[in-house]
Amino acid sequence: MDIRKLQRAIVDGLEDVKAQDIRVFNTSHLTELFDRVVVASGTSNRQTKALANSVREKVKEAGGDIISTEGEDIGEWVLVDCGDAVVHILQPALRQYYNLEEIWGDKPVRVKLTANTGFVGARPSEPMDDEDEDEEAAPAVKKPARKSAARKAAK
């Protein structure tokens, strides 16, 4: 299977289940075992397992093979071996601790996301714009109406 087709199937599978901070790295110069490493985050054990399942389904639909899957029993770090690409799906705390981008990330691959958010993998050292999303997700605090105006009108 063509590496670009495989990498697209993996990214599509991750996007389908709303993976966060998807990064793709070319590792062909570092090891002969695989050509790509994909790193993504899931917010819970359930989501990391669902992401791994989605990746397996998309790769199989595209005609690729899944060699093995590791870590699904716990779900904090799930690895999906797709032959020429290895997918690491981690929860944010583990991802920060192990910092796989430092190990594999010297040659990022530009992959266009289907949700018009730009490119992934191009700048592994720069954080994604998660801060803006957090502010929007926080519920707005509603202030009580000023009673003084109502009291003056009643007098």
Image: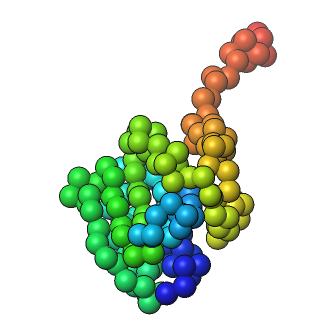
Q: Is 79 placed above or below 105 here?
A: below
The answer, for residue 152, to whether it is visible in the render is yes
Q: Position of residue 143 (x, y in %)?
A: 64, 24
Residue shown at 37%/57% (left/top)? 48
Q: Position of residue 10 (x, y in %)?
A: 49, 72
In the image, 144 versus 133, the foreground residue is 133
Judged from this view, the residue extending furthest toward the bottom is: 63
Q: Position of residue 81 (x, y in %)?
A: 36, 70
Residue shown at 40%/74% (left/top)? 82
User: Which of the 4 image quadrants contains residue 57?
Assistant: bottom left
Residue shown at 21%/58% (left/top)? 73
User: Which of the 4 image quadrants contains residue 87?
Assistant: bottom left
Judged from this view, the residue extending furthest toward the left is: 73
Q: Position of residue 23 (x, y in %)?
A: 56, 57
Residue shown at 49%/87% (left/top)? 1
In the image, 123 versus 93, the foreground residue is 123
Residue 155 appears left or right of 69 = right
Q: Is 76 placed above or below 153 here?
A: below
